[in-house]
Image (cartoon, rainbow, N blue to C red):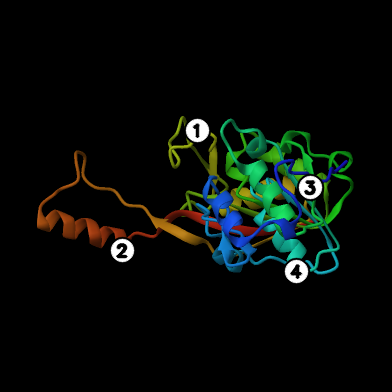
Amino acid sequence: MADEPADGSTNGPAEWSPERLRAEVASRTWFHTIDLGHGVRTPGEKDTITEVGQLHLPAMAGRTVLDVGAYDGFYSFEAERQGAARVVAADRWAWEWPGSDARRNFELAHTVLASTVESTWVSVEDLTPEAVGGVFDVVLFLGVLYHAPDPLGYLRRVRSVTGGVAVIETVVDLLDIPVPAAAYYPGERLNGDGSNHFGPNPAAVEAWALAAGFSRVVPFSPWHTNSWWSLQPGQPSTSPAGKLVERVRRRLRPARSGRMVFHAYA
């Protein structure tokens, strides 16, 4: 069952002067950009304030929302800001990662925003209705799927807690392949992060979601796409002519990878 976060190092929101809040925010590493009020925004690696407009989030007012992989909590607090009736933030990986400030960040934002978001420590592998306190109208599954060593298993867990729609945002790869396929990233091949495993193409995400028990899947257009092209074997040319060829190839070859959003319906 979800537990309320409590930051033992903080007091209520009235205790946080803008100066004290800025100093505390500056002392931490942030993944999400969160507007804490008082003119203070967290310096997130991910500009979530801009990103939220690209994710095609469904209406959340009056609905129950589960944020799987909540990290610093931006999307949990955003669901609350949009009027969700109940919000549960669920994470374990980011909240237990050695040296990560994610859980402390969540608790600080929770306190300063006077939030009523619930939280529960649970990994995706252990995600069940019992673990998170029920089945939810909207499940946010943002930036998690490509970290899954077992993507189909992860989606089955998400399906088990989805009563309405799951919003799946993920890295996609092999966009030029028309049948279900996924790129595997050994070691730290993707972004220097060994926790990244698979980059599915859209057909694979849809097939996995349907196999996991969702009734239908609605994909949205890729965003943050990257072009893919091939040079001749050897090092890229440093000559002016070679650089021009490289630039032309970048422009002409279709996008190979990027990020996409899918709505998967129960």
Q: Which element carries disc 1, helix, strand or loop?
A: loop
Q: Residue at x 73, y 67 (%)?
A: 58
Q: Which amino acid does label 1 sit on?
A: Gly
**Mark nearer the viewer, 2 or 1:** 1
Q: Residue at x 74, y 41 (%)?
A: 8
Tell me the distance, in whole angstroms, between the alpha carbons under discs 2 and 1.
30 Å
Counting from the top left corner in percent of width and height, residue 52 is at 61, 64
Q: Which element carries disc 4, helix, strand or loop?
A: loop
Q: Which amino acid does label 2 sit on?
A: Arg
**Mark nearer the viewer, 4 or 1:** 4
Q: Which residue is drawn at 58% across and 53% down?
A: 32
Q: Which element carries disc 3, helix, strand or loop?
A: helix
Of residue 185 and residue 211, the one placed in the foreground of this image is 185
- Which numbered circle lies on residue 194? 1
Label 2: few (<14), some or many (≥20) within 10 Å? few
Tell me the distance, in whole angstroms, between the alpha carbons under discs 4 and 3.
23 Å
